[in-house]
Image (cartoon, grey):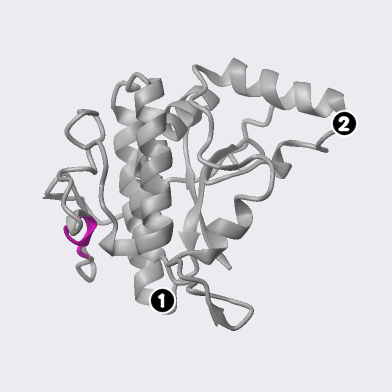
């Protein structure tokens, strides 16, 4: 089973900006949550067998680096006209905009055993979305995509023991600080009741700061 986390954003363009930025964090989210070691009762040799299974489906894995909301709408409408999907909810990327809810949905994580771990991952994802929504959209490149695919596989296969490839070549991949095989072990250390972003504690959510989903569903 997977752990899906929705974070409300203000508008469609911000959603696409966030999705583009969070693509780079998919491998670390896989590594931090990997908990599906078995397939039909037998060891699979993978830390996240769920990802290996879902990779056989269309429209899965990391999302494309759409330039803007219009490109996403064009893509969805083209697939609808071709009759290959009913609507955008049949797109199963690891991170996707969810127009009907007015959220960005992060779907990269395995379900985890402890409630405390689920809460920590949710807090981390919310912090990533906040940073991505407020920062300039990073440029994308073929090299970035190649590193992303490799790091996805490393995380699926090795979890927190994975190598982190390309951190020294993609400077805006803020979560990648080393090519060490233990890089992800130190990427996120949950602290009860506290959320950190870029080394600084974030204020605890209040009624005025909590993100609230709002639909910006396109016609």
Q: Quadrant of residue 74?
A: top right
| Residue ranking furthest to the bottom | 41
* Helix, strand or loop status at disc 1: helix
- Residue pointed to by mark 1: 115
Q: Does the magenta stretch include residue 188?
A: yes
Residue 91, horizontal then vertical, whole percent: 67, 41
Which residue is rendered at x = 39% and y = 64% of the image? Answer: 33
Residue 167 appears left or right of 107: left
Identify the mark at residue 83; answer none if there is no mark: 2
Q: In which quarter of the image is residue 167?
A: top left
Q: In which quarter of the image is residue 25?
A: top left
Inspect this view and state whether residue 206 appears.
Answer: no
Which residue is rendered at x = 69% and y = 42% of the image? Answer: 58
Q: Dot 2, how many residues are within 10 Å of its Cα: few (below 14), some (14-19), or many (20+)?
A: few
> From what the image shows, is residue 77 above or below residue 40?
above
Which residue occupies the foreground of this view, 47 or 35?
47
* Helix, strand or loop status at disc 2: loop
Residue 61, horizontal then vertical, whole percent: 54, 44
Inspect this view and state whether residue 105 appears.
Answer: yes
Mark 2–mark 1 contact, CB under 8 Å?
A: no
Which residue occupies the foreground of this view, 198 or 217?
198
Q: Of circles 2 and 1, which is in front?
A: 2
Residue numbers of the magenta segment: 184-189
Q: How far apart are marks 2 and 1 (CA)?
A: 40 Å
Q: Dot 1, how many residues are within 10 Å of its Cα: few (below 14), some (14-19), or many (20+)?
A: few
Instruction: Report the quarter where the C terminus lies.
Output: top right
Which residue is rendered at x = 77% and y = 36% of the image? Answer: 87
Which residue occupies the foreground of this view, 105 or 212?
105
């Amino acid at each position: 089973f997977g752990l899906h986390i929705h974070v409300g954003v203000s508008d469609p363009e911000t959603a696409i900006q966030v999705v583009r930025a969070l693509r780079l964090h998919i491998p670390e989210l896989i590594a931090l949550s990997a908990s599906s070691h078995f397939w039909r009762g037998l060891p699979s040799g993978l830390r996240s067998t769920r990802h290996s299974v879902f990779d056989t489906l269309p429209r899965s894995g990391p999302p494309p680096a759409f330039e803007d909301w219009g490109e996403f709408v064009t893509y969805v409408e083209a697939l609808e006209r071709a009759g290959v999907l009913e609507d955008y909810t049949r797109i199963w990327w690891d991170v996707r905009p969810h127009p009907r809810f007015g959220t960005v949905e992060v779907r990269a994580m395995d379900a985890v055993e402890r409630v405390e771990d689920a809460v920590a991952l949710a807090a981390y994802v919310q912090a990533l979305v906040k940073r991505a929504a407020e920062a300039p959209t990073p440029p994308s490149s073929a090299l970035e995509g190649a590193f992303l695919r490799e790091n996805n596989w490393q995380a699926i296969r090795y979890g927190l023991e994975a190598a982190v490839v390309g951190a020294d070549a993609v400077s805006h991949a803020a979560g990648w600080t080393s090519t060490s095989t233990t890089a992800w072990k130190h990427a996120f250390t949950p602290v009860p009741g506290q959320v950190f972003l870029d080394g600084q504690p974030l204020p605890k959510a209040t009624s005025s700061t909590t993100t609230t989903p709002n639909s910006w569903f396109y016609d």
